[in-house]
Amino acid sequence: MTRIAVLGGGRIGEALLGGLLAAGRDAGDLVVAERSPARTQELTASLGVATAPVDEAVRGAGTVVVAVKPQDVVTLLGEVAGALEPGALVVSLCAGLPTSLFEGALPEGTPVVRVMPNTPMLLGAAMCAISPGAHATPAHLDETETLLSTVGAVLRLDEAKQDAATALSGSGPAYFFLVAEAMIEVGVRLGLTRPDATELTVQTALGAARMLRETGEHPAVLRENVTSPAGTTAAALRELERHGLRAALADAVTAAYDRSVALGRD
């Protein structure tokens, strides 16, 4: 069975479908279930994939991707359970929800893989952390990795580490966006036009990320390479340390982790 059913036509579901199509997947192998009629029409027009109610989308699919809001999952699984093909793989893109929740609502032995994606998936630059449930095999992880590699990078983790991944990469883009927002605003305050301040900030962020990725150097080494004694960077870093940037980030990531744990518990 090669059919892939994506349940949920929001931004993440659309991004995955787009990535699969860009990677050469035949649109005839894809189907999306989306409750909003207007959104269904948008997806059909923009991607050319079939749409169907949940039970019809699931029936005959070898892989079922759940990409709805966490609060909608329990109701959705009730619809999925009766239509799921034996042996079909269920891939969850729902933040904070453990594989055990899916396994308890689906037929006995259903393989489930939990995924924590992030919004750069919309540009094919996601970071996806994947973890197997009780019945998922290495082959199921391979299948999930192949699926998600169309929209970014994939890292395999034990499920116990998923809340930490959520705090770092799931929520992480927002941390960088906040830093960029602050840098742009101060650039404007210092006399730059907003477009110029934005270009300076965004390209700097892109270049810094590439240096981290491509040099393989520790961030501390790269930071030290930029910092001349008694120079402008040293002055700036001294202020960031004085205002407790490291502690603030530690508290922020820990708060995201705690919230992820709470979502799974609830």
Image: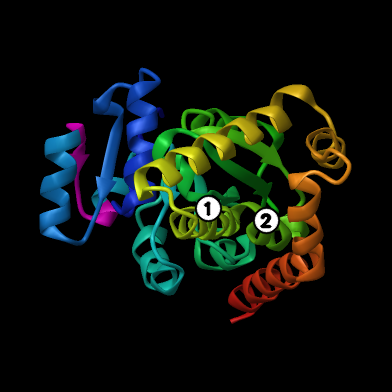
Residue 248: image location, x then y, percent: 73, 70
Crowd band around label 1 with a 10 angstrom C-alpha radius: few (<14), some (14–19), many (20+): some
**Pointer 2 residue:** 168
Of the 4 image quadrants, the one containing the C terminus is bottom right
> Magenta span covers which residues?
47-55
78, 22: nearer the viewer: 22
Amino acid type indicated by mark 2: Leu
54, 215: nearer the viewer: 215
Q: Residue at x 64, y 28 (%)?
A: 210
Q: Residue at x 46, y 49 (%)?
A: 119
**Pointer 1 residue:** 180
Residue 65: image location, x then y, percent: 43, 47
Report the side of 138 relative to 20 (left or right): right
Report the side of 49 relative to 159 (left or right): left
Q: Residue at x 34, y 36 (%)?
A: 17
Amino acid type indicated by mark 1: Ala
Q: Secondary structure at mark 2?
A: helix
- Check residue 229 for magenta coloring: no
